[in-house]
Amino acid sequence: MPAPLDILLLCRCRQAQLLPAHALEEVRAALVRSGIELIEVDDLCELSERRHEVLARIASQGRSGVIACFERAVRCLFQSASSPLPAEVRLFNLRSRPAAEIIRELGLEGSDAHLPGPERHVAAQGDWAAWFPLIDLDRCKHCGQCLNFCLFGVYRQEIDGCIRVVKPRNCKTGCPACARVCPHGAIVFPKYKAAPINGDESVQVEPSNLDNLVRQDVYDLLRHRSAGGGADAAAGRFPTEQENQQDIQRAFQERLNCSRKDKPAPPEE
């Protein structure tokens, strides 16, 4: 069993409410009883945009963990806040795993410390939904498709050619269109409801060769993403050609919705 943790960050996802309330309370109660230092935050996405100091602390602490959503989304949030997580930081996905399973994995079943551990609550500022894209630097090829597709100046290409998210608050709540047109599946919206845009890697996007990207446009690449099979299918299902076509159509519709009003309706599943 891994060594006990000294500090844990627990995200309540208060804005989107994607984490089950009963599971949050069950996990929180176990943590309080354990004596582990607990940092409870209203919204990890909002803290990432603010580059809050608690993220740097979790990233630099020796034995730390995060209980939030999908691992890929969490790592992208910390990366975006300039506090990349070392591999040894333990991540727990309360969005798709039962609370009892996480408590058991933490070794907290039946734990009851004589003195509760230190607690800290970090509140969100204002009522912003903290909806914005994250760039997965392990996948991004800095092709600029997101920059060209976005209508609201969220992205910028730096002098070194790298694409960055520079104005996250310009992003229109509920619109994941840029993630749909990324040929490498490098854009994550943690608050989106469906894989793979929310960071859930059970559905994967096959990376495209950069040489192909130079010669073709994004729509051609999306049409030819592999449907998967064999060893690839064991790791996660790839989108079918029909699903890729639907992604293209939905991306254009979402983009159109955003151009017409400030707050488009939430995207369809």
Image (cartoon, rainbow, N blue to C red):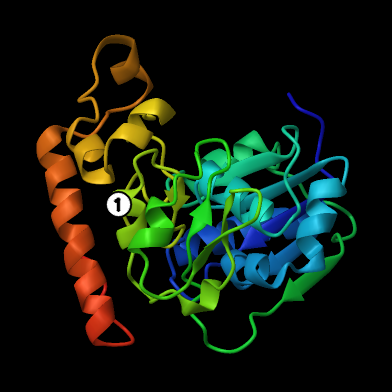
Report the side of 49 relative to 1 (left or right).
Answer: left
Q: Looking at the picture, does residue 227 appear above or below residue 218?
A: above
Q: How far across and down, in percent of the image, does residue 218 sit? A: 28, 44
With respect to residue 125, does 83 lie above or below?
Answer: above
Res 24 → quadrant:
bottom right
Q: How many marks?
A: 1
Occupied quadrant, residue 260: bottom left
Decide which of 98, 74 is in the foreground and name it: 74
- Is residue 181 among the parts visible in the rendering? yes
Q: Position of residue 210 (x, y in %)?
A: 42, 30
Most distant residue in the left direction: 242
Residue shown at 36%/47% (left/top)? 182
Residue ID for mark 1:
180
The foreground one among 241 and 235 is 241
Residue 192 appears in the figure = no
* Image: 148 above or below 144: below
Given the image, on which type of amino acid does mark 1 rest? Arg
Quadrant in the picture for the N terminus: top right
**For mark 1, does the 10 Å Cα neighbourhood hold few (<14), some (14 to 19), or many (20 or more) residues?**
many
Secondary element at image label 1:
helix
Residue 97, compared with residue 33, is above or below; it is above
Q: Quadrant of the C terminus?
A: bottom left
Where residue 144 appears, x then y in whole percent?
A: 44, 51
Q: For the point 63% across and 35% down, which residue is it? A: 105
Considering every residue shown, the one lying at the far top of the view is 230
Residue 222 drawn at (x, y percent): 23, 39
